[in-house]
């Protein structure tokens, strides 16, 4: 049986080499932080490289949407309580399409989805100029919801995010500015409510049709 030879002292890296490698790694990390992470996450671009790579725009969108969502939440907390809005009526699905959808959903069900019955909703949202609104789904960790939304005209800013149960820090999944539609799969990273904040920055009313299907117990307007 052959054992690997133990390296000699001459083959081991010297203290100087280790120190140089550490300095190179530190400088590289700082460069990535300044040129990529800060512009993309916080719109801080001291070198101007982030603007050239269009990363600063991403950071500005995230900052703007976060400020708008927080301002709306603060205003909602100060406003007097009003009766909850009745959820929009869901059109009766075609029986054949519903049966086919149920079969397909059961083929790809996950453990988290198995704990929550599949549900389908179509929510119509109308926003006046500069108006914002937040709709969220109550979901279990790991649950998945297929979604699609589109505006009838114009565009909106949006932030798709989740709020863990217990009031922990929110998690942003996706953001956009001046968007007319989006679709995909929303996966809950924790038990709680997950959904969208929409803001109409245009000069005319915008109607959004939001379609959701998957493992959630309810959809409700938060603000």
Image (cartoon, grey):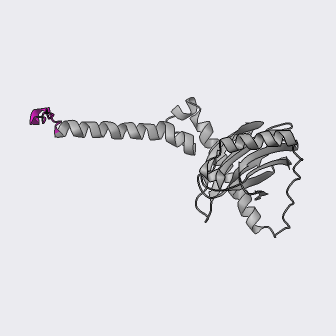
Figure quadrant of residue 158: top right
Whether residue 149 is visible here, answered yes or no, is no
Whether residue 118 is visible here, answered yes or no, is yes
Q: Position of residue 221 (x, y in %)?
A: 78, 57
Q: Nearer the viewer, residue 92 or 8?
A: 92
Q: Position of residue 60 (x, y in %)?
A: 63, 42
The residue shown at (57%, 33%) is 51
Q: Is residue 132 left or right of residue 185?
A: right
The residue shown at (65%, 56%) is 115
11 drawn magenta: yes
68 drawn magenta: no
Magenta part of the chain? 3-14
The total number of labels drawn is 0
Q: Main secondary structure of the magenta part?
A: loop
Q: Nearer the viewer, residue 100 or 85?
A: 100
Furthest residue in direction bottom, as rendered: 80
Q: In the rendered image of this protein, does residue 100 appear above or below residue 135?
A: above
The residue shown at (34%, 41%) is 26
Furthest residue in direction top, as rendered: 52
Q: Is residue 45 left or right of residue 27?
A: right
Figure quadrant of residue 95: top right
Q: Position of residue 134 (x, y in %)?
A: 75, 53
Q: In the rendered image of this protein, does residue 63 appear above or below residue 70?
A: above
Q: Is residue 69 left or right of residue 211?
A: left
Q: In the rendered image of this protein, does residue 122 appear above or below residue 56?
A: below
For the C terminus, which image quadrant? Answer: bottom right
For the N terminus, which image quadrant? Answer: top left
Q: Position of residue 155 (x, y in %)?
A: 79, 38
Q: Nearer the viewer, residue 82 or 38?
A: 82
């Amino acid at each position: 049986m052959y054992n690997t030879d133990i390296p000699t002292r001459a083959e081991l890296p010297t203290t100087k080499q280790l120190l140089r490698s550490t300095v190179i790694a530190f400088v590289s990390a700082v460069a990535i932080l300044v040129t990529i992470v800060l512009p993309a996450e916080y719109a801080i671009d001291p070198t101007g490289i982030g603007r050239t790579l269009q990363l600063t725009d991403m950071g500005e969108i995230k900052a703007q949407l976060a400020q708008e969502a927080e301002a709306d939440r603060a205003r909602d907390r100060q406003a007097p309580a009003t009766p909850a809005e009745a959820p929009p009526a869901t059109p009766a699905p075609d029986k054949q399409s519903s049966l086919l959808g149920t079969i397909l959903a059961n083929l790809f069900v996950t453990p988290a989805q198995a704990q929550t019955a599949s549900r389908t909703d179509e929510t119509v949202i109308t926003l006046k100029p500069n108006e914002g609104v937040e709709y969220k789904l109550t979901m279990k960790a790991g649950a998945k919801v297929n979604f699609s939304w589109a505006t009838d005209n114009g565009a909106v800013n949006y932030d798709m995010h989740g709020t863990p149960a217990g009031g922990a820090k929110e998690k942003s999944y996706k953001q956009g500015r001046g968007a007319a539609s989006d679709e995909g799969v929303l996966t809950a990273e924790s038990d709680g409510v997950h959904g969208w904040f929409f803001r109409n920055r245009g000069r005319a009313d915008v109607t959004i049709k939001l379609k959701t299907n998957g493992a959630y117990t309810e959809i409700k307007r938060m603000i």
